Amino acid sequence: APLARAAALGGVRGIGIGSAGPVDPAAGTIAPVMIPVWCDAPVVAWASAWAPGVPVTLVGDGICVAVGEHWAGAGRGADAMLGCTVSTGVGGGLILGGRPWPGPSANAGHIGHIVTDPDGPACPCGSRGCLELTASGTALLTRALAAGWTGPEGNRGGAGATTADLAEAARSGDPVARRVFAEAGRALAAAFTSVCAVCDLDLIVVGGGVAQAGPLLFDAIDAGMREFAGLPFVRRAVVRRAALGADSGLVGAAAPLHAPERYGAERHAPERDSAERPDAAEDDRTAV
């Protein structure tokens, strides 16, 4: 309702939607792995109905975090960076050559579904051992409760427990809570160094609710980066905490409107249909 009223008064120039993904900007729909009830939700159509005639842009939330931090936060000036949000799930977005790189499908940077444990549990995405199963807020709580953490004082059993509760337990010395944060940080570092090896990154900016744990998470990430970053160009990558906090994604969703020359849709790689994709000899293909 507030959006519709603002649009009616001429106060809305555009709408930017940053959503957990995968996203489909062409169809205007989302299919968030960790929120299956929203699969195929027509979010662009909903926004257009609330604000008729106002342009709507749909972008993955990880790309929004990357763009927000690159435009106005910890990533200013970076030529090659990963923005990563660690929250209910784990998302990411790439800045390459100083510009957003969402890829042909607008979903590049989906770091939460890098496999960090090939023999790990099945993931809702259809793979197994994904980073998200170790490092997301959902995973931290699930793993801690399964390992014997009983939740905060006055809430034994863990019903309604949050990652903030778990972080407080870790700071108070709870061994299970400390271990799951250490495992999450190490898994994130394994994924980060892999992306650095492929994309030659300068910087990784980490935000989201789990990042609010501060040193509990970032000390473990730093230790993992030292463990896994073997090549000199990978070792030079710097990990920083997001400067914009919970606003990174909101700022990034607005960036294409306010700075279209740097972050507008025209900067995104166009989607190609199957007829235009690079071909390969039949015997060179791997069926999946």
Image (cartoon, rainbow, N blue to C red):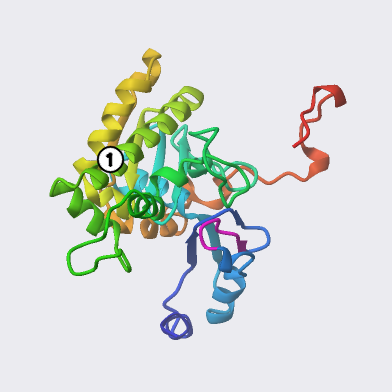
264 part of magenta stretch: no
Residue 187 drawn at (x, y percent): 39, 35
Against 38, residue 105 (above or below) is above
From the viewer's side, name the closer residue of 143 and 252: 143
- Name the residue rendered at 54%, 74% in the picture: 47
**Start-end of magenta stretch:** 29-35
Against 132, residue 1 (above or below) is below
**Residue farthest along the front direction in this orientation:** 148
Q: Classify residue 24 by image quadrant.
A: bottom right
> How many circles with numbers are drawn on the protein?
1
Q: Classify residue 173 by image quadrant.
A: top left
Local crowd at mark 1 within 10 Å, few (<14), some, or many (≥20)? Answer: some
- Name the residue rendered at 55%, 66% in the picture: 56
Residue ID for mark 1: 179
Residue 66 drawn at (x, y percent): 41, 45
From the viewer's side, name the closer residue of 235 and 121: 121
> Please, what secondary structure does the residue beneath circle 1 have?
helix
Residue 59 drawn at (x, y percent): 52, 55
From the viewer's side, name the closer residue of 42 and 288: 288
- Name the residue rendered at 44%, 58% in the picture: 253
Q: Quadrant of the C terminus?
A: top right
Q: Is residue 77 visible?
A: no
**Does residue 83 appear left or right of residue 128 in this picture?**
left
Q: Classify residue 2 by image quadrant.
A: bottom left
